[in-house]
Image (cartoon, helix red, strand yellow):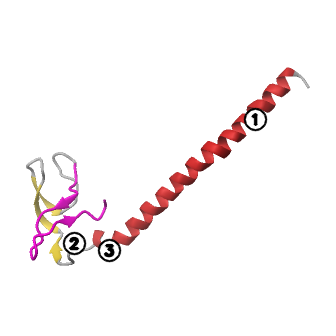
Amino acid sequence: MSKQSSSLALDVLGLALWIMFIGLPLLLWWAAKLFFRLLRLLWRSPQLFSKDIRCVNGHKNPAIGSWKCSCGAVFSGWAFAPCPVCGRSADYVDGCEICGASLLNPLR
């Protein structure tokens, strides 16, 4: 066996070992993470397309209206839409109309 062919065999073996012990586990981790994010999005999808959003205690509140961003801008639309000024969306909105609990962003 020549030096060149043995070097090529070692390169192929090294690549196969990298794929088996590093590449494949990383791919599986990424696929599992993507699967659970999609599952969470599907679970929360009714809230995404509803005009009402529920607080942590289950009370209905309007999700469409006028909102004030933490940057100070006031905008109309869905409560968790990106702010037209700073581009951030809220993690939560203060104040259920009934109990005062926070309204959580269904996308997070």
Instruction: Say if 36 sits above or below 1 in the image.
Output: below
Q: Name the residue under label 3.
A: 46
Q: Which-is-in-front pick, marks 3 and 2?
A: 2
**Circle 1 — which element?**
helix
Q: Residue at x 9, y 77 (%)?
A: 98
For the point 16% across and 66% down, the residue is: 102
3D distance between C-alphas at marks 3 and 1: 50 Å
Mark 1 residue type: Val
Going by the image, does 10 lie left or right of 20?
right
Q: Is residue 19 above or below residue 4?
A: below
Of the two numbered discs 3 and 2 on the same chain, state the one appearing first in sequence.
Answer: 3
- Crowding around mark 3 (Cα neighbors within 10 Å: few <14, some 14 to 19, many 20+) is few
Position of residue 83 in the picture relative to residue 34 (left or right) = left
- Label 2: which residue? 56
Q: In which quarter of the image is residue 105?
A: bottom left
Q: Where is residue 54 in the image (x, y as percent from the top left)?
A: 21, 74
Res 27 label: none
Q: Position of residue 77 (x, y in %)?
A: 17, 63
Q: Quickly name the residue at label 1.
A: 12
Label 2 element class:
loop
Q: Badge 2: how crowded within 10 Å, few (<14), some, or many (20+)?
A: few
Q: Where is residue 52 in the image (x, y as percent from the top left)?
A: 20, 74
Q: Which of marks 2 and 1 is in front?
A: 2
91, 65: nearer the viewer: 91
Residues shaded magenta = 88-108
Say which residue appears at 17% left-offset and 78% top-offset. 59
Locate the C terminus by quadrant: bottom left
Q: What residue type is labelled 2?
A: Val
Q: Do the residues labelled 3 and 1 touch (CB within 8 Å)?
A: no
Q: Which of marks 2 and 1 is nearer the N terminus?
A: 1
Q: Distance between the residues labelled 3 and 2?
A: 16 Å
User: At 21% from the left edge and 78% from the top edge, which residue is drawn?
Assistant: 58
